[in-house]
Image (cartoon, rainbow, N blue to C red):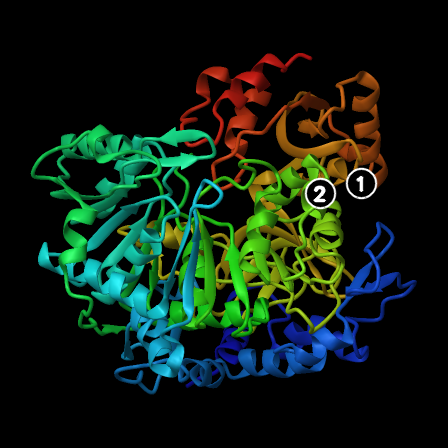
Amino acid sequence: MEDPLTSSSSSSTTVSPRKNLTTSNHLRHVESMAKLPSGAGKITGLNAVILGEALASEEDDLVFPSENFSRQAHVSSPQKYLEMYRRSVQDPAGFWSDIASEFYWREKWGQQVYFENLDIRKGKIQIEWFKGGMTNICYNCLDRNIESGNGDKIAIYWEGNEPGLDSSLTYNQLLARVCQLANYLKDIGVRKGDAVVIYLPMLMELPIAMLACARIGAVHSVVFAGFSAESLAQRIMDCRPKVVITCNAVMRGSKIIYLKEIVDRALMESAQNGINTDVCLTYENVSAMKKEMTKWIKGRDIWWQDVIPKYPVTCDVEWVDAEDPLFLLYTSGSTGKPKGVLHTTGGYMVYTATTFKYAFDYKPTDIYWCTADCGWITGHSYVTYGPLLNGATVVVFEGAPSYPDAGRCWDIVDKFKVSIFYTAPTLVRSLMREGDEHVSRYSRKSLRVLGSVGEPINPSAWRWFFNVVGDARCPISDTWWQTETGGFMITPLPGAWPQKPGSATFPFFGVQPVIVDEKGVEIEGECSGYLCVKSSWPGAFRTLYGDHERYEATYFSAFPGYYFSGDGCSRDKDGYCWLTGRVDDVINVSGHRIGTAEVESALVSHPQCAEAAVVGVEHEVKGQGIYAFVTLVEGVPYSDDLRKSLVMVVRNQIGAFAAPDKIHWAPGLPKTRSGKIMRRILRKIASRQLDELGDTSTLADPTVVDQLIALADC
């Protein structure tokens, strides 16, 4: 098969002004790591600490792995990484075939391991991996682990909303539960390729439902159980499911959410638009609501507990092609119709398992906890599929991370002896705000690796996470990836090289990130620009459901020949990557392109600032001005002097051109229940378009919006 790097390079010389597309130039940024035994380039004036020996301070450029950690790591040095990375981009077919062969395939794929066209000028965008190979991801998650002797190993520890409410399932027990649900779904007519919508909170039944769909070849579409009825209806109307799976209610902290009522409204709305769903399978979540209190529609609604336990605990596997659909996951519908990101089976399976293993340096003795909800891609790849494909023990948490107090996360870590903890910067910053005492009163000695996901983590939050939560002995896997990528794209590998607080570091195996300018020309060396990826990787999404034209226009038309991530990125002199946020979160002030994440990071470095969110607003002189929403540390009063101090921090760290025009005091920020800041709402408040705020029902606390409006002129 023709090497994609070579063919891409040769074709680009005649049709594009792009340059530097050869493998050797691409590797230049990581090859420099070989020049220092534990470094990543010629770094002068080095200030550094070593894991477990000292705290990371504001002056430290690097955090080195300890000799002991590196010695035991899957990737133990820059040289080992370079050896694996070089092969992954020079011989992707051989590299990924070797890894894929570790999984069970009913039939092996054909001679062509992968096919790709990422250049819209050459025809339809198309990506295929392991086509012709027959497998099943549920079988590889469960049966394969049981057959290897791990049937009695705990697969899932479940922690309920209320402390003390918990449960667990071994791999044997999990498989039995999955098979019962799979048999029921088959019995009501769900077949290979049919869609099933899952609208569940973080009960064990959520990953069970995902795996049951995968076992019979059905396509699951998990919708975060915090979306409004209107948002849920949009997704139902788009994928037309045979069944919707939900529960009657859930407790989030001290608040009850009536999920079944939301589903009822969504099903009514979709029916009014001609899309009828015949079955609503409802789990009775007894800790939140009793059966008798639940509104019911006879003939459509079925109680999970009444039917599922009656089905056999074994179920035949539906073997599917590697390119058969596995799941649909809709991106936010804040603007226009939601995008139904479609992932297929084989490549996604291989990629999510491999990224989990290496990015977290996973060992069979680890207890792993990812705080994400399965309604988002992180919950798909790194709560369910990635860990279970590796035979891991996973913690699933139903409740709120600060309920009943800000120490709940560390209580759970100690309870289950969690060794790998993966969460979002938003949660890190909110726990920072509550004070170190909520962390230090728990042991956390079991922790070995920390992880960050969802947005760039600012250096001061990174250092707090490292120093306080990890006791300066746990590396942080600060992962950059997207719903569309299926798995990690740029991430530290613990033990392989030193980390820079706030940097996602270097690309994962097989990933070829490039930074381009506005004309699509690749930029070498130290630079900033648009982050793109050339050549495919196994976990890449294949299309947008029912709208391939939108798929091509959104991701492949801006810079032909590349996948365009929509994110900005800087690369420093040592080759480290620094994500600067969405390109549409870049503010152009008097010709200066300023990443909102950069300004937010500067603000949060102020000792009295707990969290910040920055948006751009129209400015009659500058074109755009910088508008900052700032949440202060508990107990700190608002004052003009503090406002000036915050502006000065930004001026000092970035420059006068980046100084915020407005500091808007924010007791809290509008966030979804997964912790994502709804910047769309902040932009409307900043520009005083208060009649255009849109749907706020998905916010964890909708009252925050009224508080922000009240403080607009303070």
On the rendered image, what quadrant is the N terminus found in? bottom left
Q: Earlier in the sequence, mark 2 or mark 1?
A: 2
C-alpha separation, residue under disc 2 versus residue under disc 1:
8 Å
Q: Which residue reaches farthest left?
A: 299
Q: Is residue 31 above or below residue 348?
A: below
On the rendered image, what quadrant is the C terminus found in? top right
Which is more toward the observer, 160 or 257?
Answer: 160
- Left or right: residue 685 versus residue 264 is right
Q: Is residue 695 above or below residue 91?
A: above
* Res 689 visible: yes
Q: Residues within 10 Å of mark 2 (few under 14, many from 20)?
A: many
For mark 2, what is the residue?
598
- Left or right: residue 296 versus residue 342 is left
Q: Quadrant of residue 435?
A: top right
Amino acid type at circle 1 is Ile
For mark 1, what is the residue?
654
- Marking on residue 619: none
Q: Residue at the location (39% across, 60% down)?
A: 541
Q: Residue at the location (35% across, 53% down)?
A: 204
Q: Which residue reaches farthest front?
A: 164
Position of residue 338 measured from the top left corner of the image (x, y, whole percent): 35, 41
**Secondary structure beneath label 2:** helix
Amino acid type at circle 2 is Glu
Position of residue 563 measured from the top left corner of the image (x, y, whole percent): 49, 60
**Secondary structure beneath label 1:** loop
Which is more toward the observer, 96 or 313?
Answer: 313
Q: Residue at the location (56% across, 38% down)?
A: 402
Q: Quadrant of residue 226?
A: top left
Position of residue 521 measured from the top left corner of the image (x, y, whole percent): 62, 60
**Mark 2 and mark 1 residues within 8 Å of each other at the beta carbon:** yes
Q: Quadrant of residue 215?
A: bottom left
